[in-house]
Amino acid sequence: MRPEIAQRIKEAKELGDLSENAEYDSAKEAQALNEGRIEDIKSTLESAVIITGNNLSGTVGVGSGIKVESKDGTRSFVIVGAAESDPIKGFISNESPLGKAFLGHKKGDKLEVRTPKGIVEYKIVEVN
């Protein structure tokens, strides 16, 4: 993407007066957005922590896959960092109310969690 933006800037400069050159302004804005995104990605990568799914302690933590039962049936979740969360697919953030509630618990634990539907009781039936 950088080469394409650089080419757009070069072509816009060749058009002449930069003070009233919309193409130049557009290309410079695209460049700024692109560079900002690159910095965001670098920052994320620099602070990334590799978490393996091997949970020998049986305690729910980030990276744990869990199966829970409630009055609504059985559901499976994976506790992930906020950047990876996708609740529809069962990837819940460790910072979400539900994710926070499960952290530190073990198979067989029962807990109550305040949800938009009200208080829901969950039983952890599997941790891996």
Image: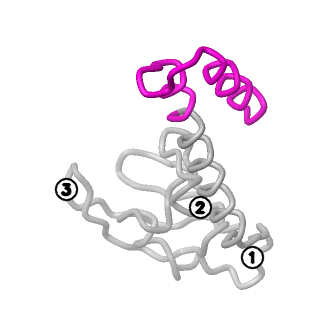
Query: Is the magenta region chiefly helix, strand or loop?
Result: helix
* CA neighbours of label 1 inside 10 A, class few (<14), some (14 to 19), many (20+): some
Residue at label 3? 118
Q: Which mark is residue 55?
A: 1
The stretch drawn in magenta includes residue 26:
yes
Give the amino acid type for the residue marked by disc 2 in the picture: Val
Quarter the N terminus occupies: top right
92 or 126: nearer the eye? Answer: 92
Residue in view at x 65 percent, y 27 percent: 9
Contact? badges 3 and 1 (CB < 8 Å): no
Give the mark, 2 or 1, whose residue is nearer the N terminus: 1
| Three-letter amino acid code of the residue under disc 1 | Asn
At mark 3, the secondary structure is: strand
> Marks 2 and 1, Cα distance to the nearest angstrom?
14 Å
Q: Nearer the viewer, residue 120 or 28?
A: 28
Secondary-structure class at tag 1: loop
Q: In the image, residue 78 lies at what x, y percent?
A: 61, 57
Examine the image and state in which quarter residue 121 appears: bottom left
Q: Are marks 2 and 1 in contact (CB under 8 Å)?
A: no
Q: Secondary structure at mark 2?
A: strand
- Which of pointers 2 and 3 lies earlier in the amino acid sequence? 2
Q: Name which residue lies at 35% across and 51% down.
A: 71
Q: Is residue 79 magenta?
A: no
Q: Position of residue 66 (x, y in %)?
A: 60, 61
What numbered label is drawn on residue 80? 2
Q: Is residue 23 left or right of residue 39?
A: left
Which segment did they paint magenta? 1-29
